[in-house]
Amino acid sequence: MKIDALVADTEVTVEVITQGKNINLKTAVVESAPDTKLYNAAGQRLQIDAPHCLVKLITVKNTALKFDSGQYTVKVYASYESSYYLWNIVRIEIVTLANGERYHAIYSAQEGVRINRRGSYRLYVGKRMPVQFGEGRPREVLVKDVSVNGVGLVVPEDMQCQIGMKIRFTFKDTYYALSIPIEGTVVRIMPMEEKGQLIGCQLPGVSAGLEKYIYNTQRAKLQGQRQSTKPLTKKE
C-alpha cells in the first residue's frame, strides 16, 4: 500500500536511528484533501512529486523537529486494516498550509512493506532474564519468544500477574552484543500443562531493535542451513 492510503487519526511511528540508538517518535495522520496546497518555511508552494500524508507536527520541548540531516536513518511504521506496514525510504519535512497551520509531510514513493505482528512469526529465545512486573522487584523468568511488537514469558504458577500489568526488562544477546530496552503490557495469561504460566505481552509499537535481531537471527539460520546442504565435492 502507498503511504497516502493512511486515513485520518492513524497512529504513525517515526523511527530515527542515529549513533547506534533507536528513537521512536509518535504522531498521527491528519485529514487533508489530495489537492491541498503545501508551502515551505519561505512561503514557496511545494511541488509534490510522490505519495504523501500529513501528520501532526512532531516536536521536542515545543520545537518542531527537522529530518533533513544525512547523519541518521529514518523509517516510518503505521497500522492499516489490522496489519503493520513499514516504509524505510522516506522524506519528512515541515510544511505549512494556506491557513498557517504547520504539519510534517511524509513522502514515500515505495509500497509499504507488511511486517510480522504478534501472533504471526515468533522467534524462539528460551533464555532466562530479569523482568520487572508492575512496581515490584525484577524476577528472573524465561523469555520464551519475541516478535517485532511482543514477547512471550513463562513465569511460576504462583506468581501474581494481571491483564494490563506493565513489564520492563532489557533483552540481551551476547552473540550479537546487544541490549534492547523492552516495555510492554500483559495482554494474555494462560496456564501451562507443566507448572507455570505463559504471559503474552504487547509492546506499544514496533521495536526496531527486536525487528533487527529477528532478521539477523533468521538470516544466520538460513545461511547455516544452506551451508549444511551444500553438495560434497570429490577430492582430487
Image: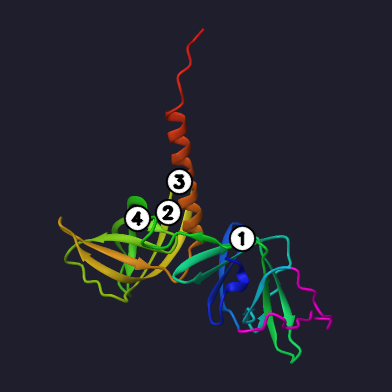
How far apart are labels 3 and 2 at the CA level? Answer: 17 Å
Which mark, residue 88? 1
Circles 3 and 1 in contact, beta carbons < 8 Å: no
Q: Residue at x 22, y 65 (%)?
A: 190
Badge 3 density bin: few <14, some 14–19, many ≥20, Cα 10 Å: few
Q: Quadrant of the N terminus?
A: bottom right
Along the viewing direction, whichever of 213 and 234 lies nearer the viewer: 234
What secondary structure is marked by label 2?
Answer: strand
How far apart are labels 2 and 1 at the CA level? Answer: 25 Å
Circles 2 and 4 in contact, beta carbons < 8 Å: no
Badge 4 density bin: few <14, some 14–19, many ≥20, Cα 10 Å: some
Which mark, residue 30? none
Which mark sits nearer the N-terminus, 2 or 1? 1
* Residue indicated by mark 2: 172
How far apart are labels 1 and 4 at the CA level? Answer: 25 Å
Left or right: where 85 falls relative to 40: left
Circles 3 and 2 in contact, beta carbons < 8 Å: no
* Image-quadrant location for residue 162: bottom left
Give residue 98's position: percent from left, percent from top.
Answer: 76, 89
How far apart are labels 3 and 4 at the CA level? Answer: 13 Å
Which mark, residue 145? 4
Give residue 161's position: percent from left, percent from top.
Answer: 24, 71
* Residue indicated by mark 3: 218
Q: Residue at x 46, y 33 (%)?
A: 226
Give the number of the mark in front: 2 or 4: 4
Placement of 228 over or under 220, stated as above or below = above
Placement of 6 over or under 124, stated as above or below = below
Per the rendered image, the range of residues in magenta is 31-49
Left or right: where 160 falls relative to 138: left
Along the viewing direction, whichever of 122 and 17 lies nearer the viewer: 122
